[in-house]
Image (tube, rainbow, N blue to C red):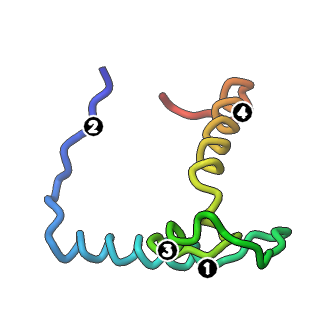
Amino acid sequence: MPEVAKPSVKPNITMKTAYTAITLFIYLVCSQIPIYGIQRSHTADPLYWTRVILASSRGTLMELGIGPIISASWFIQIVNAIGFLKVNG
């Protein structure tokens, strides 16, 4: 069974707060960057209140969800299986 080594230093509250703030900043920036090629329409938006709660806009990077992460994972696995990329594990 694979194991993960215990951290040598226990993270303190300052480090946890910094990581949370950085992650929140990245999320808010990605919620405002528009996706290239998406045309904005002025019709009714059925997900309007979801966008309000998540601080997102229609046609932004956050609308892609986890699709790009899954696609990148598949691509890396295929490239590794072919032998173009050497990954330990």
Tag 4 and tag 2, C-beta contact below 8 Å = no
Q: Residue at x 71, y 70 (%)?
A: 59
Residue at which label 4 appears: 79
Of residues 15 and 63, the one drawn nearer to the viewer in this rendering = 63
The tag earlier along the polypeptide, 4 or 2, is 2
- Identity of the residue furthest to the top in this view: 1
Q: Quadrant of residue 21?
A: bottom left
Residue at which label 2 appears: 4
The tag earlier along the polypeptide, 3 or 2, is 2
Q: Nearer the viewer, mark 1 or mark 3?
A: 1
Which mark is drawn over residue 32? 1
Determine whether the residue tagged by mark 4 lies in a helix, strand or loop.
helix
Q: CA distance from mark 1 to mark 2?
A: 36 Å
Q: Residue at x 67, y 42 (%)?
A: 71
Q: Nearer the viewer, mark 3 or mark 2?
A: 3
Q: CA distance from mark 4 to mark 2?
A: 25 Å
Under mark 2, the amino acid is Val
Residue at which label 3 appears: 26
Q: Nearer the viewer, mark 3 or mark 4?
A: 3
Answer above or below: position of 10 versus 26.
Answer: above
The tag earlier along the polypeptide, 4 or 1, is 1
